[in-house]
Amino acid sequence: MSSALSVEKLVSDAKDTASKLGIKKFDIYGAIVDETSAEVDSGEPKQVSASNRASVTVRVWNEEGTVGVTSTTNTDRVGLELALQSAHEASFFGAKENIPDFSPEAIAILPQASQTASQTAPQTAIELLVATLLDAEKELLAKHRAIAGVPYNGLSQRDISRFYLNSDGAMRNESSSYSSIYLYTKTEEEDRKPRSAGAYRVSRDFAGLDVKGCVEETAEKTISHLNYDKIKSGKYLVVFSPEAFLSLISAFSSLFNAQSILDKNSLSNPDSIGTQIASPLLNVSDDELHIGNVGASTFDGEGTPTRRTPLITDGVLVNFLHSSVTAKRLNAKPTGNGSVGAKVSVSPNFFHVERSNVANESNETIYDLEKMDNIIWIDELQALHAGVQASQGSFSLPFDGWLLNKGDRISIESATVAGDILELLKAIVYVEPEVKITPSGVAPKIWVEGLSITGEA
């Protein structure tokens, strides 16, 4: 049975079962995923897998207005009946304050443009996935004698069907597909430390997957790290790659997260809207429906349509990300960033970083990597889970990158970048005009003055 047909049957069963149980107010959000994936090692298939999995969250309100929540992976009629019953029983122990309700936009018409986010692609035979990955590994190993292996790799294709319904008549249903590949190398050279590098590509279908580009980027990065050296500690003009800057913004997304703000676990507070938190050169939005977002969803876990939400405009904080619960508490509108679980949470979807309208175009001739000396290029930040104190604003992160002198680059053997996120945002001196679409968002290169870099002693 296809995912789409499974969703249609699940929705029908849910409505019938709720009626049978006498449950008058409920909603259900879920997803069904079909996935095939492959890994290889030294010219042989390492792991080949196929899975079909479901995740369904059920909320039931009782006559007293409190809500109970339960989750299930069993999507047949028996599983749904047990989930609805359990949620109803749990509702009598639900919170008495800030009780979640249906999103006021759960029955709103989805914008026409958002329909483009829902599209599926035909599945590719698993044999072709394995053969493609084996060829990619072979090609990488032939790029340089120092490349000893590709220990981490994978090629997968995924079909996802998402749905939301509630007892007030809301009904959302969408299906999409995407394929992805990642490659990560390791080198071996006598009297030299092992060096590594990787790349990732994603596409709406296997036919459009840029396997060659992934191989070329991985090889180029790996080879460029072979010539490495120590750097002196100090303050540097730093250029963040699009991927590195997006990972930093994501790590400090509590700046924009209304739930984190209400929980007092953010640098922002309800009165922060309208304050200058970054250089006037910077714009940041949450842009789930960006054409480059291969895994875009047209609605969130509460059924609210997703959209573009400006967060920083000309360096000024202009919006927070909301669920229906935080929107009600802060007298705002839901932004399509809610997810349902034991409690409704808020999370960013797809960041879009760009230069602002007030960006000074004259400085394009000043910041030129081909003409400047002693520039640190940060390509990838590491240990974000351990090196970021989001509620305090501080970070101390190892990174992969290069020291650049008039375009020539030497890989940095080992170094850490440290600072305060608000100070970093205000120290941005140049936002390049050209953006790059990545799997986690859209961003240009970002230049920051005076960051503390600690090199290996």
Image (cartoon, helix red, strand yellow):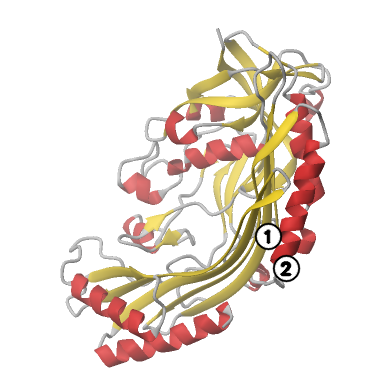
- Residue 391 vs 146, above or below: the answer is below
Query: In the displayed structure, would residue 304 be above or below residue 136?
Result: below
Q: Residue at x 75, y 44 (%)?
A: 137
Examine the rendering and report whether any part of residue 266 can be seen. Answer: yes
Element under label 1? Answer: strand
Q: Which residue is drawn at 67% across and 72% down?
A: 119
Answer with left or right where residue 294 lies relative to residue 278.
right
Q: Which amino acid does label 2 sit on?
A: Thr
Image quarter where the C terminus lies is: top right
Q: Residue 254's mark?
A: none
Mark 2 neighbour density, 10 Å: few (under 14) some (14–19) many (20 or more): some
* Residue at the spot of label 2: 124
Q: Position of residue 255 (x, y in %)?
A: 44, 41
Q: Is residue 267 left or right of residue 318?
A: left
Dot 1 corresponds to which residue?
Answer: 179
Q: Where is residue 188 in the image (x, y as percent from the top left)?
A: 70, 24
Q: Quick one: label 1 or label 2, which is nearer the N terminus? A: 2
**Residue type pointed to by label 1:** Ser
Task: Locate the N terminus and report the quarter of the image it occupies.
Answer: bottom right
- The residue at the point 36 percent across, 71 percent down is 72
Residue 155, image x, y percentages? 67, 54
Circles 1 and 2 in contact, beta carbons < 8 Å: yes
Coordinates of residue 226 in the picture (x, y in percent): 74, 21
